[in-house]
């Protein structure tokens, strides 16, 4: 029979579903809390915790998965020692964990945490934030080495920040192979983000008597598996404390706290560290969002169609000649090709004409959806492996939908980026952990044949740029038609209608595009200033949309946007307007609307969207909505910014929410 192995820094009780009869206890229960087992009679929870506390546990667990918070009690027969208990349900049993408390350690904990939180909030970039986090965690826990490990797309771990004492070697900058973080371990951190091992070498406690089917996966007291014990011992670690860093799409990384000697971390300290990690994570996501927003704006600003550009459109060749240097810098590329109507306009280092033609032909056949295509290994990618592209190593291609049957292409190329990686151990394709090398002999690997990776924000920016280019090229084509086909009125009318569609309507969702909705907002601002006619903006986007694209593909993502646009547009008044602001963001312009009406409309739309179902997608679709009502002095930019800020608060308040923008004076 399998006997669960437990650590000895706390005691554990397995209780029946009614929280009355104790089915098993850890072997250290008597030693830890001074409890004396009754010689006869049934062992109950009241025997260990006392009648009042056991009743409270039973009451607070009724219908709940776990206690809303820890409970404390004092055993007077045991030198007035203080203990803390956690209780949660695991299948048909209730698991009760008991840990001793040291009140003296709480004296300055709150002040320390408050001060460290202030430093986290003041951090202006990711590395500063992570450095602040590891120093704060080390100060709170006293571990000799605290590191932040970030996972790459292949689940290899890179140590990106470190606070180091004098007893353990540095791991900063080193990589650990994905075999050290198997799928089961990563999934465990998703469900149980905190893991404490006080002493890797301590003999384990067990349950008496053994309880068939008792699951202790969620217990902080569970002892490390033998392979994990060996792994930490090879690292020279006896005391370990680790916490998960959850990103917006899953496990971003881990915080590792290591000590060469046994090391305890009391419950209040664990809670404080977890709070710091959660706050640092939110700050990191915010910093990244701001950085990405600035980058996207720079790309968008690189091709803003002025009034003159609309009246005197530029040819694809002129556009590329004017903007190529800026684009290559923005996308870290050494070559760019604009493929239109079977011809290539190029700048920088690009493939030979024959290879370029074959590349586009294969893209047309293999890449049918509207999203970008990219690779960082042209020589190994099936679509490009046989093409003669000796100076290119990475490619990012964006389709431009010129019509329902024809696509142009914007393609960036990158050179090889030779990179030296330093591993704490030699990677292996075996599922078993690799053999750890001595720190002085860390294994280095030279990565060749790859370009720099295409970042998610770069792919998004390329799509935005492609949409602007589609409009610019279409404007040029229409201008050419107007000059050369004046006699063919029918063809000219159809072409002008296509330009009108491209200029004012989003090609995917068929609602107004950003340019058209901006025109409507500006017109409404003029009316509001002249007649004091209030109106409101509802800015919203799809929650977790990137996850939908990543898991189900861009085709399902497109279906979500189309269905959402149809639902919202059909639910508006005739005097209200819907526009696609960009990506998964939309704006509703609600005319003649005070704040109450605007909030009511937002809540109604939010509820309607939550009921939307998409074929091939099991999860519900939700939106976060920011509402801004016109205030005197508002411009198009300020009212949209206030709505955007409100939407951001809705997202970070839990998503699927409506938030109202602050008034301009309050926002300042």
Image (cartoon, grey):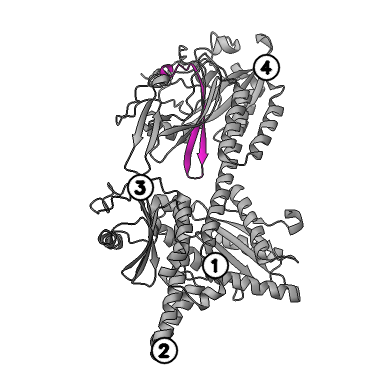
Residue at the disc numbered 4: 74
Disc 4 on helix, strand or loop?
strand
In the picture, the disc for residue 514 is 1
Q: Disc 2 and disc 1: Cα gap in Å?
A: 31 Å
Label 3 crowd (10 A; few <14 / some 14-19 / many >=20)? many
Residue at the disc numbered 3: 376
Question: Do tag 4 and tag 3 residues touch (Cβ < 8 Å)?
Answer: no
Q: Which of these two is toward me, 590 or 81?
A: 590
**Which mark is first along the chain, 1 or 2?**
2
Vertical order, 624 against 630 (above or below): above
Q: Disc 4 and disc 2: Cα gap in Å?
A: 94 Å
Which residue is depicted at the point 38% across and 43% down? Answer: 417
Disc 2 on helix, strand or loop?
loop
Give the label, 4 or 2, closer to the camera: 2
Q: Which of these two is toward me, 549 or 441?
A: 441
**Which mark is first along the chain, 3 or 1?**
3
Give the label, 4 or 3, closer to the camera: 3
Give the label, 1 or 3, closer to the camera: 3
Q: Main secondary structure of the magenta part?
A: strand
Residue at the disc numbered 2: 486
Q: What residue range appears in magenta?
A: 233-255
């Amino acid at each position: 029979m399998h006997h669960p192995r437990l650590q000895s820094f706390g005691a554990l009780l397995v209780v029946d579903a009614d929280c009355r009869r104790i089915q098993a206890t850890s072997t250290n229960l008597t030693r830890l809390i001074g409890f004396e087992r009754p010689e006869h009679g049934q062992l109950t929870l009241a025997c260990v915790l006392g009648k009042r506390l056991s009743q409270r546990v039973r009451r607070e667990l009724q219908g709940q998965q776990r206690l809303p918070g820890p409970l404390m009690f004092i055993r007077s027969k045991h030198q007035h020692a203080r203990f803390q208990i956690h209780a949660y349900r695991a299948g048909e049993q209730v698991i009760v964990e008991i840990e001793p408390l040291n009140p003296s350690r709480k004296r300055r904990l709150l002040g320390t945490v408050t001060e460290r939180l202030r430093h986290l909030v003041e951090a202006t970039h990711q590395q500063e934030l992570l450095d602040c986090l590891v120093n704060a965690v080390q100060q709170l826990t006293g571990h000799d080495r605290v590191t932040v490990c970030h996972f790459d797309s292949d689940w290899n771990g890179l140590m990106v920040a470190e606070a180091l004492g004098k007893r353990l070697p540095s791991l900063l900058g080193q990589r650990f192979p994905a075999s050290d973080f198997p799928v089961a371990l990563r999934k465990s951190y998703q469900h149980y983000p905190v893991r404490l091992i006080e002493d890797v070498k301590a003999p384990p406690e067990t349950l008496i008597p053994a309880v068939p089917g008792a699951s202790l996966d969620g217990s902080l007291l569970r002892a490390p598996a033998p392979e994990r014990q060996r792994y930490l011992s090879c690292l020279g670690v006896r005391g370990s404390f680790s916490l998960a860093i959850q990103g917006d799409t899953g496990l971003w990384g881990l915080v590792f706290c290591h000590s060469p000697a046994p090391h305890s971390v009391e419950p209040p300290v664990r809670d404080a560290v977890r709070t710091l990690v959660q706050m640092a994570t939110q700050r990191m996501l915010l910093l990244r969002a701001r950085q990405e927003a600035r980058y996207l704006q720079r790309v968008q600003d690189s091709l803003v169609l002025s009034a003159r550009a609309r009246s005197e459109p530029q040819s694809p060749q002129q556009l590329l000649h004017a903007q190529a240097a800026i684009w290559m810098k923005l996308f870290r590329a050494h070559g760019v090709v604009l493929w239109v109507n079977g011809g290539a306009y190029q700048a920088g280092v690009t493939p030979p004409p024959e290879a370029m033609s074959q590349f586009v032909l294969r893209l047309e056949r293999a890449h049918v959806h509207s999203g970008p295509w990219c690779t960082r290994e042209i020589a190994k990618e099936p679509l490009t492996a046989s093409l003669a592209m000796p100076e290119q190593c990475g490619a990012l291609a964006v389709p431009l939908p010129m019509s329902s049957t024809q696509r142009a292409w914007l393609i960036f190329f990158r050179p090889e980026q030779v990179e030296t990686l330093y591993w704490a151990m030699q990677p292996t394709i075996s599922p078993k952990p690799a053999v750890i090398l001595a720190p002085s002999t860390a294994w280095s690997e030279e990565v060749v044949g790859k370009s720099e990776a295409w970042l998610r924000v770069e792919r998004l920016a390329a799509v935005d740029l492609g949409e602007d280019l589609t409009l610019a090229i279409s404007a040029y084509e229409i201008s050419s038609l107007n000059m050369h086909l004046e006699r063919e009125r029918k063809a000219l009318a159809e072409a002008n209608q296509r330009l009108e569609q491209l200029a004012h309507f989003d090609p995917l969702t068929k609602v107004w595009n950003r340019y058209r909705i901006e025109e409507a907002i500006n017109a409404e601002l003029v009316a509001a200033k002249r007649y004091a006619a209030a109106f409101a903006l509802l800015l919203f986007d799809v929650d977790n949309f990137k996850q939908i694209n990543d898991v189900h593909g861009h085709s399902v993502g497109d279906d979500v946007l189309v269905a959402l646009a149809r639902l919202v547009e059909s639910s508006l008044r005739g005097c209200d307007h819907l526009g696609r602001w960009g990506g998964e963001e939309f704006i509703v312009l609600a005319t003649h609307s005070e704040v109450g009406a605007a909030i009511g409309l937002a809540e109604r739309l939010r509820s309607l969207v939550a009921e939307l179902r998409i074929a091939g997608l099991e999860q519900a679709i939700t939106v976060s909505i920011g509402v801004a009502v016109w205030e005197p002095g508002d411009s198009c930019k300020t009212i949209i910014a206030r709505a955007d800020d409100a939407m951001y608060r809705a997202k970070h308040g839990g998503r699927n929410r409506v938030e109202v923008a602050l008034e301009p004076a309050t926002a300042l």
